[in-house]
Amino acid sequence: MKKFNYIIKDEVGMHARPAGLLVSLARNYKSKILIEVKGKVADATRLMSLMCLGAKSGDEVVVTIEGEDEDAACEAVKTFFLDNL
């Protein structure tokens, strides 16, 4: 299992565009990718679940990745967060 924390820097937070891109990215991996914000958890392959997190600028996100390709998935998701959120 891989895990990392990230503070959202995008002033709009996790809105539809980055959430949709994250879903597309997460679907490329076999590992389970979970996103947690303020105690709410969402599967990264489900757009509406991500949107319901209500992640805003300054919120801490905890990303947990578990599965056979977790190393590659973790690196890709970290890069995604740095580039988009």
Image (spheres, rainbow, N blue to C red):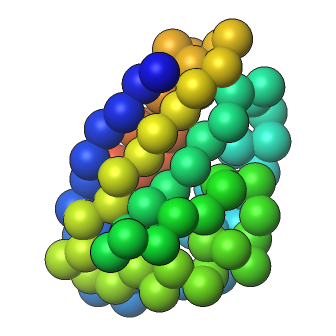
Q: Using the rendered view, name the quadrant where residue 16 is placed.
A: bottom right
Residue found 33% across the figure and 60% down from its top: 61
Quadrant including the C terminus: bottom left
Residue found 62% across the figure and 81% down from its top: 51
Q: Is residue 14 visible?
A: no
Q: Seen in the image, is 12 located left or right of residue 24?
A: left
**Number of callouts:** 0
Q: Where is residue 24 in the image (x, y as percent from the top left)?
A: 77, 51
Q: In this view, does 70 lie above or below 13?
A: above
Q: Nearer the viewer, residue 13 or 63?
A: 63
Q: Position of residue 29 (x, y in %)?
A: 75, 28
Residue found 77% across the figure and 64% down from its top: 46
Q: In this view, does 79 lie above or below 80?
A: above
Q: Position of residue 60 (x, y in %)?
A: 24, 65
Q: In this view, does 42 lie above or below 44?
A: below
Q: Where is residue 35 in the image (x, y as percent from the top left)?
A: 50, 56
Q: Which of 11 and 31 is in front in this view?
A: 31
Residue found 53% across the figure and 32% down from its top: 65
